[in-house]
Amino acid sequence: MFSLANQVAVITGAASGIGAATAKRFASAGADLVLAAYSPDGHDVDAVRAAVTRAGRRVHVVETDVSDTADVEALVGTALSEFGRVDIALANAAIARRKASTALGDEEWNRTLDIDLTGVWRVFRAALRPMTEAGYGRLLATTSTAGAFEAWEEHAHYSAAKAGILGMVRSLAAEVGPRGITVNAVAPGIITTPQTLDSVNSLGADGIAHTGVSQPVRRVGQPDDIAAAYHYLASPDASFVTGHVLLVDGGRMLMRG
């Protein structure tokens, strides 16, 4: 079910968390992969590369800063030069930095939007060209409950970027649907990732634990929970789903409405 056999997927933010879990799942479903890594983050992309190889799939890792258009073009270019196609593009890379709005300057605001929103657009734009030529594609992005479904104090810049992804996904889906390309996003709730475990800029371990006992499923999410959603949306089986933002939050929003 949801086979990705002989497809090629490009994933940003692939060295940890949701990106790493999705890379492994896509490989298990039959996809070859081009993974974007950003070494200053300090995550071990080699472990992800090894897992993909163990699954019997081909993989290339490209050092990529999604705030750099040339880097993103080179990332997608690697998929084309090595595999000859791009079937799936998942724009997953993002940052979250806690900052009171009264102290939030232009540089911090612009940096967050450049990575979290414009970075998604750079990936989509680069992948759209080969997908349009092929008449097939799956564009996917990681948004958040923050901004789109709930407030997150001291994260106005992050929330604005993540909310912006919704508008991009919906408008782009209407534009490129006739070309055989679907565009969707997943809005994760609280997921145990290195970013969420950061107690300075996010919830930290204590905040995650509190969330787990207070939402309907009585646990927090794991990266594999989001990877499963992406697996479906990336597959040919999801050909009638586009312009959609899939909320995967363990029922968190039911309790916060």
Image (spheres, rainbow, N blue to C red):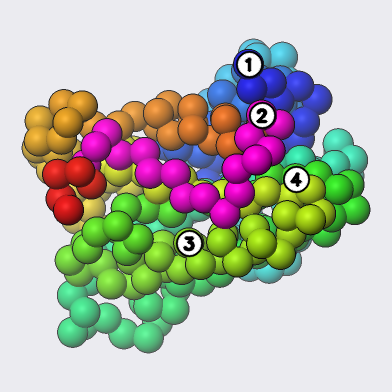
Quadrant occupied by the N terminus:
top right
- In this view, the residue in front, 231 or 80, is 231
Look at label 3 and name its amino acid.
Leu
Q: Are marks 1 and 4 in contact (CB under 8 Å)?
A: no
* C-alpha separation, residue under disc 3 versus residue under disc 1: 28 Å
As displayed, is residue 208 above or below residue 164? Answer: above
Classed neighbour count for the residue bearing mark 1: other residues with Cα under 10 Å, few (<14), some (14–19), many (≥20): few
Range drawn in magenta: 236-252
Q: Is residue 102 left or right of residue 132?
A: left
Query: Would you say residue 149 sits in the magenta stretch?
Result: no
Evaluate whether residue 3 shows in this view.
yes
As displayed, is residue 221 above or below residue 88? Answer: above
Classed neighbour count for the residue bearing mark 3: other residues with Cα under 10 Å, few (<14), some (14–19), many (≥20): many
Q: Which mark sits nearer the N-terminus, 1 or 4? A: 1
Q: Is mark 1 on a helix, strand or loop?
A: loop
* C-alpha separation, residue under disc 2 versus residue under disc 4: 13 Å
Q: Mark 2 points at which residue?
A: 237
Q: Are marks 2 and 1 in contact (CB under 8 Å)?
A: yes
Q: Mark 4 points at which residue?
A: 137
Q: In which quarter of the image is residue 219?
A: top left
Q: In this view, does 120 lie to the left or right of 86?
A: left
Q: Mark 3 points at which residue?
A: 166
Of tags 2 and 4, which is closer to the observer?
Answer: 2
Look at label 2 and name its amino acid.
Asp
Query: Would you say residue 245 sits in the magenta stretch?
Result: yes
Q: Which mark sits nearer the N-terminus, 2 or 4? A: 4
- In this view, the residue in front, 210 or 132, is 132
Q: Which mark sits nearer the N-terminus, 4 or 3? A: 4
Look at label 1 and name its amino acid.
Met
Q: Name the residue under label 1.
A: 1
Residue 48 image point, x, y percent: 56, 28
